[in-house]
Image: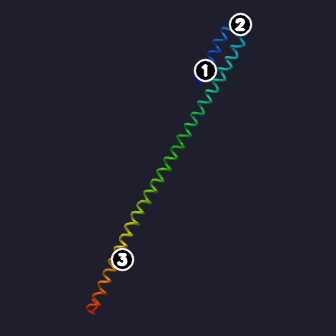
Amino acid sequence: MNALSTLINRLSDLATTAPHEYRPQLNRQVAALRAGFKKQQERCIAFLQLTNEYADRFLLDISEEIQQQSSFLDALEKRLDMAKTLRQEAIHMRKSYEDGTLDCIKKVRRTGVYP
């Protein structure tokens, strides 16, 4: 944008040094270039603002999605921990039951009496 503005300014300077009969036409052309440049600049600024708004919305949506996924992951990690704990308790209970049952059977075999 700056380069184009510089070129238009240079054309304006050159138009002032042109022969007198061509100056009005060259000045009109430079004015048309400036007007076109200004419209294009306004469109570009509007586009950048719109792009910025959509980028902000997109980032907000992504942030919300990340928070939801994080909460879901936390819940899954808690369930995994509970499942591991439950598994350990089940193993412990089975072992305790087997040990108690085996001890009882051994005692019945030794003594012949059920406790």
Which comes before the other along the chain, label 1 or label 2? Answer: 1
Residue 5 is labelled as: 1
Judge left or right: residue 57 versus residue 115. Answer: right
Mark 2 / mark 3, whichever is N-terminal: 2
Disc 1 residue type?
Ser
Q: Kindly identify which residue carries mark 2.
A: 19
How crowded pointer 3 is (Cα within 10 Å; few <14, some 14-19, many 20+) is rated as few
Asked which secondary structure carries label 2, the reply is loop
Q: Using a 10 Å C-alpha cutoff, classify the residue at mark 1 as few (fewer than 14 neighbours), some (14 to 19) or many (20 or more).
A: some
From the viewer's perspective, is residue 92 above or below residue 44?
below
- Examine the rendered structure and indicate whether residue 47 appears above or below residue 89: above
Question: Which residue is farthest right?
Answer: 21
What residue is shown at x 62% (from left), y 30% (from top)? 43
Residue 81 image point, x, y percent? 39, 63
Which numbered disc, 1 or 3, marks the residue that appears first in the sequence? 1
Residue 94's disc number = 3
Residue 109 is situated, as x and y percent measured from the top left of the image, at: 29, 90
Which mark lies nearer to you, 1 or 3? 3
Using the rendered view, name the quadrant where residue 92 is placed: bottom left
**What amino acid type is highlighted by mark number 3?**
Arg
Comparing 75 with 85, the one in front is: 85
Q: Quadrant of residue 111?
A: bottom left
Q: Quadrant of residue 11?
A: top right
Query: Residue type at mark 2?
Result: Pro
